[in-house]
Amino acid sequence: MKSFYKLLLILLILGGCAINKQIPSKPNIAAENYFFFAEAAMQQNDINNAIELYEKAVKADSNNVYLKETLITTLALKAYFDKSAYGQIIETGKPFCDKNIKSEKIFSIMAEAYQAELQMENAEKCYKKAIKIQPTMRNLTSYYIFQQNFDPPVNIKLLKKAIKHKWEEEKLVLSIAKLLSAADSVKSHEIYEKAYDKWQDEICLTSLLTSYEKFGSYNKILEAIQLHIDHERDISAPIATYLIGRYFMLEQYDKVLENKVICFKIGTHDILKYLFFSSIKINDIQTGIQAGIALEATGEVPEELKNSFYLYSAELYFIDEQFNKSAVSLSNIPDVTTISSFLFSDDFAENAEQKENINKVIVEYSDLLDDKANANYLWGIYYSELDNKEFALTYFDKLTDDYINENDLNFMLAIGYIRNALDVKRARSLLTSMTEIQINPNEFIANLLIGTKNDSLAYSILKEELAAKDKPDSTIFISCALIGEKYDTADSLLIILERGIELYPENWELLNAAGYLIADNELEYKYDKAALYLKKAVLLKPEYGMIWDSLAWLYFKQKRYDEALQAMNVPISEDINNSEIAYHIGEIYLSLNKQKKAEHYFKLSIDLNTEIRSVQLSEENLKQLLRR
């Protein structure tokens, strides 16, 4: 069921619950007593007992429509959390519907229950009866969504009729506009504009902004947000941040400064960053610095924002090349990992000037400290980034285990010792000593080594993990099989994967890996087993194209080409972004003598260039096709 439809259902349920309401049509005394006992149960969140009592109330007064509506509505509330209750709704409500009860609420809920049970013909009948009884905005919209999901093409007139009703539910109106956007974007935008004029809140503003974005009217987005702020209407941090961030991206730094009041009012990490950087970009660094100093002097910076405040103050000074003041700001940040993240950005190794400036800051920072532990850690990272292994290890070795554990540096130091010395023993010790987070040291270390020149060491570590434990993590088996392709036989890797399947029989990744291994390596004596693995994997994850690809590849290896192509329906229907899948499809089409289609997918495999072997095989096949 679509999430939007769930929203409509919840609105319906909450709108229809009878808790603490007067009964419109007074029942007999017995039914009334059951009803009020049920109400009390609902107030205690005892929904099952409430349902039993509502059922007794209905039996006591079988002609009271309101009691029936309350019972069905309560069952719908239960079904929202327990899908098995949909059958109970149908069983209870069908006799009501058979007697043509005049209740659009009951027919609406019955329609949803039939839909959940995939009884689409009955669902549609109930939708139509609900609309005939009372064509509300919600009923018309619900029926439209039903058609959209299960019986296309849809009748857009349903939405246009729905929107003509009185606008009372803001979210429903906005949902109709969203549904209309694909078929009639102009009408959809018109609804968003009118909704904002009516309610003038951020929910409508957000929808209107999305509509402007669809039309590419980015200036209108800025104008709408700015006007919203200028009228002193409430605005959330994300939208205000979007406005300031967009001004920043458009290099309208003066606009950022014009909104500095709202920047400080919101006070988030990003919005402060835009304000500080904008001050620098327009060569008004002092404004940014003074704003930071003034904010600090008021003592209004919350404790949870102090790290961000000092970090961006340091960044402001750093850009202005006032390295001493940048270091002073950094010295106010107790978390050394925050400082490290600031100093060692992604482009560190590409910028020689940046490296030199960072060196200057660390020198200044170190001079400010009595305890040099933080500085030693930063020097270790600095030289590690420079690939100066000896210096990096010298500074890492100065750090005590207590300091490392207190500052949660185990991960980074483990990486440091692997990167600079392949010191598996030290890395394992650091990871094992972690108390707050449980991690598998061997898996972590192996993952660090995968894709490097030390793949063989990673494979040895993973095999050691498999041998040491009765039930290793499922990911160990998969990682071991992936790396082992370079160092072991297919038969040996299959033994590893089948052990994993024995321990984790419902793990689709293991099933897929084993099935594909058998197919790709043409282990014919295991083809039947591969089929069992892959068919089970497909049942577990039917939406995953990669599993269908594996099953198709098995059929291909068995020369069952038509079945292979049929299995490829899911991958072919998707946006293919994997060279291996494209190559497999090409091979299947080639085997079916559909050369043009084969050529298309071989070229796609080459263009995607995500897997070397598939690209090479695709190139060879294309050459052969050209010779024909």
Image (tube, rainbow, N blue to C red):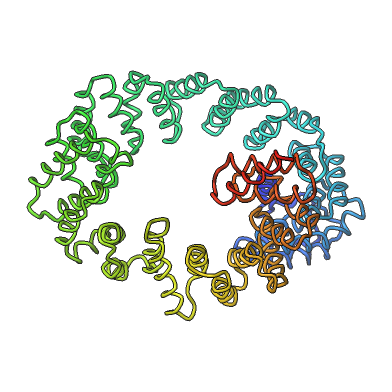
On screen, residue 450 above or below 25: below
Q: Is residue 620 left or right of residue 60?
A: left
Q: Quadrant of residue 145?
A: top right
Location of residue 276 in the rendering, given as x and y in whole percent from the top left corner: 28, 29
Q: Residue furthest right?
A: 99
> Residue at 17% across / 40% down in the picture?
329
Q: Is residue 483 left or right of residue 535?
A: left
Q: Is residue 105 left or right of residue 543?
A: right
Q: Quadrant of residue 74?
A: bottom right
| Residue 539 vs residue 461, the one in the foreground | 461
> Residue at 45% across / 27% down in the picture?
233
On screen, residue 93 above or below 338: below
On screen, residue 214 above or below 311: above
| Residue 234 vs residue 336, the one in the foreground | 336
Location of residue 586 in the rendering, given as x and y in whole percent from the top left corner: 70, 47
> Residue at 17% across / 45% down in the picture?
332
